[in-house]
């Protein structure tokens, strides 16, 4: 009798506990959507993608020196993508062999067969894109004043902007060009879409 009375009086407490547990489970169901949006499966993936973007953002401008006595391409550290606008300004003079005081646009004579761009001016600043450690000469140009071009898909791929002095040999050359490069992303105010280069 004592056991039966004890069980009888304990029954309301058991029912109250069951109701409390059920209510707690219901609260979890109600909050499910909120947890999905704020928890690791939701918010953190957005955070991860934005941090990935930050990690892969490349510089949009750079200043480099391009020596006339080197046959190695000078990297700018600036990557350009198809559709973006590339602007380059250059100054300085170089001496190629016996031809002196050549500006970035080159001398009045063609460079010759041994040059990176044979039919283009001797000593001119060559601009190209390098992708996967390979310079794409199908996407190259000779510097001209107010050089600005929109990178198109014809012959071009995303890559780093690189420079070279157009010369048949380099051992006896001297001088250098001071070069500034800037990239305007697609849709930016500076993305004028000018094309002075033949890219």
Image: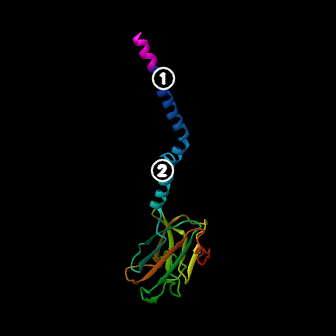
Of 3 and 22, nearer the camera is: 3
Question: Which quadrant of the figure contains the C terminus?
Answer: bottom right
Check disc 1: other Cα within 10 Å, few if <14, some if 14-19, many if 20+: few
Q: Position of residue 32 (x, y in %)?
A: 54, 40
Q: Looking at the image, which residue is at 46% across and 76% down? A: 164
Prevailing secondary structure class for the magenta stretch in the rendered image: helix
- Among all residues in the image, which is located at the extreme left? 171
Q: Position of residue 189 (x, y in %)?
A: 59, 74
Q: Mark 2 or mark 1: which comes first in sequence?
A: 1
For discs 2 and 1, the disc positioned in front in the rendered view: 1
Q: Is residue 154 above or below residue 1?
A: below
| Label 2 SS | helix
Q: CA distance from mark 2 to mark 1?
A: 44 Å
Of 44 and 101, nearer the camera is: 44
Q: Say which residue label 1 marks.
A: 12
Q: Is residue 189 above or below residue 19?
A: below
Q: Quadrant of residue 190?
A: bottom right
Magenta-colored span: 1-9
Q: Say which residue label 2 marks.
A: 44
Specify whether residue 8 is in view: yes
Specify whether residue 167 is in view: no
Task: Report if residue 49 lies within the magenta region.
Answer: no
Tell me the colour scheme of the image: rainbow
């Amino acid at each position: 009798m004592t056991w039966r009375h004890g069980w009888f009086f304990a029954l309301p407490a058991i029912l109250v506990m069951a109701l409390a547990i059920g209510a707690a489970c219901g609260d979890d169901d109600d909050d499910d959507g909120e947890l999905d949006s704020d928890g690791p499966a939701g918010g953190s993936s957005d955070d991860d993608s934005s941090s990935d973007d930050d990690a892969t953002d490349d510089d949009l401008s750079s200043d480099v020196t391009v020596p006339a006595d080197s046959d190695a391409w000078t990297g700018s550290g600036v990557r350009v993508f198809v559709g973006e606008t590339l602007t380059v300004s250059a100054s300085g003079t170089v001496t190629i062999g016996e031809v002196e005081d050549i500006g970035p646009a080159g001398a009045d004579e063609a460079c010759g067969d041994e040059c990176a761009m044979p039919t283009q001016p001797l000593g001119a600043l060559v601009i190209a894109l390098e992708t996967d450690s390979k310079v794409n000469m199908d996407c190259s140009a000779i510097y001209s004043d107010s050089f600005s071009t929109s990178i198109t898909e014809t012959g071009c791929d995303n890559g780093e902007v690189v420079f070279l002095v157009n010369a048949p040999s380099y051992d006896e050359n001297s001088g250098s060009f001071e070069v500034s490069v800037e990239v305007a992303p697609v849709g930016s105010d500076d993305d004028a879409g000018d094309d002075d280069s033949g890219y």
